Amino acid sequence: MRGQGQRSVRASRFSVPVVLLLGVALAVLRPASAQDATPAGGGERVEQIALVTPASRANQGWDQQAVDNLSAVSEERGVDVLVADNAGYEDITPTLRDFAEQGADLIVCHASGYQTVCPEFAEEEGVRVAVIENPDAATPGLVADIETQAQEAAYLAGVLAGRTTASGTVGIVASGQPPTWNYMSVGFAEGLKAARTDAKLLYAVIGEAAYEDAAGAKRETEAQLAAGADIVFGMGDGASFGMIDAIEEHNAELEEGAAPALFIDVIGDKREEHGDVLLTSVLFDYTGVYGQLLDDIEAGAFGRVHTMNVANGGVRLLDLPENVPPDVVAAVEQARQGVVAGDIEVSAIGDADGLRRRLDELLQGS
Amino acid sequence: MSGIDWAAVLTVLLRGAVVAAVTLTLAALGEAVAERAGLLNLGIEGMMLGGAFSAVDAAARTGSVAAGVLAGILAGLAMGVLFGCLTVSLGADQVVVGLAITIFAAGLTGFLARDLYDGHAATGADLPDFAIPLVSRIPVVGPALFDQNLLVYLTWVLVPVFAFVLGRTRFGLGVRAVGEHPFAADAAGVDVARVRYAAIATGGAMAGFAGAFLCLGDLSFFEPGVTVGQGFIALALAMLGRWSPYRIAAGALVFGLLRALKTGLPIAGVDIQPDFLTMVPYLGILVALVVLAGRTALPAALGVPYARGRR
């Protein structure tokens, strides 16, 4: 230890002139360094990126996934992150203004409910924003759009459900009817019907933006289970835990040997806590899109529409449990290849009326 | 839809309606006492959240649902006393204080849930159902009403207890007196501040109990915002029920049944827009408000701070 101390004393004698020299060098070179920071593409270096989400960053769903993914990208790219969660669906302009004043180079507005306010703010204040499910708002240099059209991955989940259900009845429980949920409901229903034409599908909406209504989710799920559903595809954020609660209680009361009901989740991975009921999850991975947004800013090409799909890995199914039969795994993989190759086209329907019409078409006779 | 076991579906729907009604009844009973004493408690939603989180936290730490329920009640009671300090002792505006408590509790419970439980606090404790012999075997109604957990039965016991206390006891008379005419009550020797403190403490404790029931008797976890505005529905129910515990319980049950109807219609294949179905229970409340408009006389001193010698 003593030797180390001596070394550090010696080092400190040299360090003073070295630091002075480095300081002078940095001062001289600073303008050049700043010039170097400008990316070769003619854009600008991103220093800070902001994210606003409607609900808690810890809901193991839509909001948490965005926060986690953006944090991962920012860490990799050395970019600072500002997060405002629980912003709700009211006017978020004060939050956006606060971000702008803090110098955010980009604000990601992570809710389809922010489709209007964020582009308006971008236009008024000249701040770059990224919005969800509003391709018409894409504006070069100002507004980028992220299409979280997970219908393709939901289609695969539907195929899995169709090949797995023993009762032939499958449920969908949604905590609202935002475009993202609607895309997935249609995709799931089409996959289910493709895998099993005689399957019955129950569809329930908990409420208007009932993303945290776990008790309401539990009521809807209990009713579907009582009506014979043995697989429930749940889109809920916090409400998803109510669905899982219902399924776990339902399974606990089953007679010995009866097949347990299963849950298909969206966005995140709940295997650690609820692996006993989780069949799979339609995973959202925003890291690729967030990386593209930064690339676009640096290349001077910001302001286009980014789509997350099965082919680019933006959406995919969580690895299936080991007890899923090989022929079912093969059927899902075959469907995935068909989607990637373009042989299977999944409807992209984001509006509630369109969803209703499509479900009516698919469910005629069931 | 063919092939559906309708008895099973109806049982589940009715059972769900009862469970939903319990949460509302507990909170609304407490609100009725507070309002009868002249205190408009808009902090009820926050008190429910505080009770819900405290209940789950205590149950998770001790493994005991009873400890969880007690913690939930105590948390609500503490928030009720805080409301009392600010409004009864300091004369602050009840609406502002109530909303502040709700916003504060939403933030605090969200922060604690995130910090201590990564956003989702599971209890790990189970509250078993208790089937009442014979009646629990009645088809549909039996399992829905008489095969529930003890907190559900306790709630139905509390309804006549509250009716008795409010209508037939000296304390109840004092509560009504300070809510209608605190000056006269004071002149008659009633300690207005003490009665109002007792009333809001009861209101807070019941809101905490409601939150505890939601997260221990219905669900088995807490998550931020889990009460989703049920406190405000309870507040409306207390007024709709004109502070009568029996009418409050009936109103809560009707609300639960309307929600069950909303759940059941799509399963029955009735083709109605989900948006409309979602609206049905709240439409029921609006209709009741319209029907009862003019017949619901608020306590005369509701929302009015009392200071001896100052009118």
Image: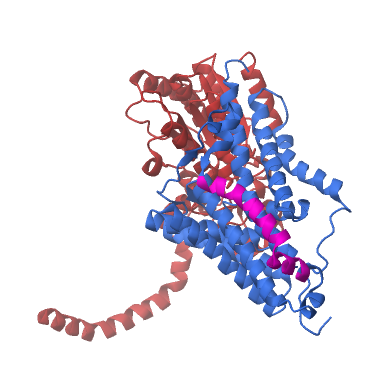
Chain colours: A red, B blue
Q: Quadrant of the N terminus of chain B?
A: top right
Question: Camera-side residue: B30 or A236?
Answer: B30
- What residue is drawn where x is 85% and y is 49%? B292
- Residue A98 visible, this orientation: no
User: Does residue A233 lie above or below B299 as drawn?
Assistant: above
Question: Can residue B253 be found in the magenta stretch?
Answer: no
- What residue is drawn where x is 77% and y is 45%? B285
> Residue A192 in the image: x percent, y percent?
52, 21
> Residue A194 in the image: x percent, y percent?
52, 17
Q: Quadrant of residue A2?
A: bottom left
Question: Can residue B167 be found in the magenta stretch?
Answer: yes
What is the magenta segment's predominant secondary structure? helix
Image position of B268 (left or right of A218): right
User: Does residue B147 lie above or below A292 as drawn?
Assistant: above
Image position of B88 (left or right of A308): right
Image position of B18 (left or right of A263): right
Q: Quadrant of the C terminus of chain B?
A: bottom right
Question: Camera-side residue: A53 or B153?
Answer: B153
User: Does residue B209 lie above or below A240 as drawn?
Assistant: below
User: What stretch of residues is rendered in magenta?
Assistant: B150-178
- Residue B277 visible, this orientation: yes
- What residue is drawn where x is 61% and y is 43%? B20
> Residue A215 in the image: x percent, y percent?
57, 44
